[in-house]
Amino acid sequence: MEVIPFREFSSFNEVVVLDDTPYKMHFHWNNRGEYWSMSIADNDGTVLIDSVKLVNNYELIDRYAGSGLPPGELYVADSGGVVFTIDRYSLSSGELQLVYVPESEV
């Protein structure tokens, strides 16, 4: 399991290596809807998925299988108590974590 780094900024990019492949991830906080969304591009910048809402304890990329995304599983996971909503700072504070489970561990 790998924790994807999350920052306090309301919009930021992160390059991560998942199952030995680099991906460019973009995260954006939607003020009006009060939720985080995520986009993932390959190393060349080709967008693979765009504006997927982050939800707690739900596999985020399996429904896009075969689109060049990492072969493992991606979740927002509770790191301690029971957290039902994802607020602006719950991911950057570590209360929740965006985690990737590699294909070898699925």
Image (tube, rainbow, N blue to C red):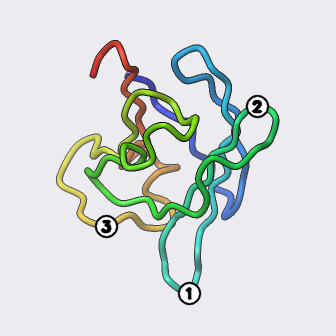
What amino acid is found at the position of numbered circle 1 in the picture?
A: Arg
The kind of secondary structure element at disc 3 is: loop
Q: Position of residue 40 (x, y in %)?
A: 63, 46
Q: Nearer the viewer, residue 16 or 83?
A: 16
Q: Nearer the viewer, residue 44 or 31?
A: 44
Q: CA distance from mark 3 to mark 2?
A: 31 Å
The kind of secondary structure element at disc 1 is: loop
Q: Position of residue 44 (x, y in %)?
A: 81, 34
Q: Earlier in the sequence, mark 3 or mark 2?
A: 2
What amino acid is found at the position of numbered circle 2 in the picture?
A: Asn
Please report contact status of discs 2 and 1: CB closer than 8 Å, yes or no.
Answer: no
Within 10 Å of disc 3 (Cα), the crowding (few <14, some 14-19, many 20+) is: few
What residue did someone put label 1 on? Answer: 32
Residue at (42%, 45%) from the top-left corner? Answer: 61
Q: Which of label 3 and label 2 is nearer to you?
A: 2
What residue did someone put label 2 on? Answer: 43
Q: Which quadrant of the structure image shows residue 5?
A: top right
Q: Earlier in the sequence, mark 1 or mark 3?
A: 1
Within 10 Å of disc 1 (Cα), the crowding (few <14, some 14-19, many 20+) is: few
Query: Left or right: 69 with respect to 76?
Result: right
Please report contact status of discs 3 and 2: CB closer than 8 Å, yes or no.
Answer: no
What amino acid is found at the position of numbered circle 3 in the picture?
A: Thr
What residue did someone put label 3 on? Answer: 85
Residue at (54%, 36%) from the top-left corner? Answer: 69
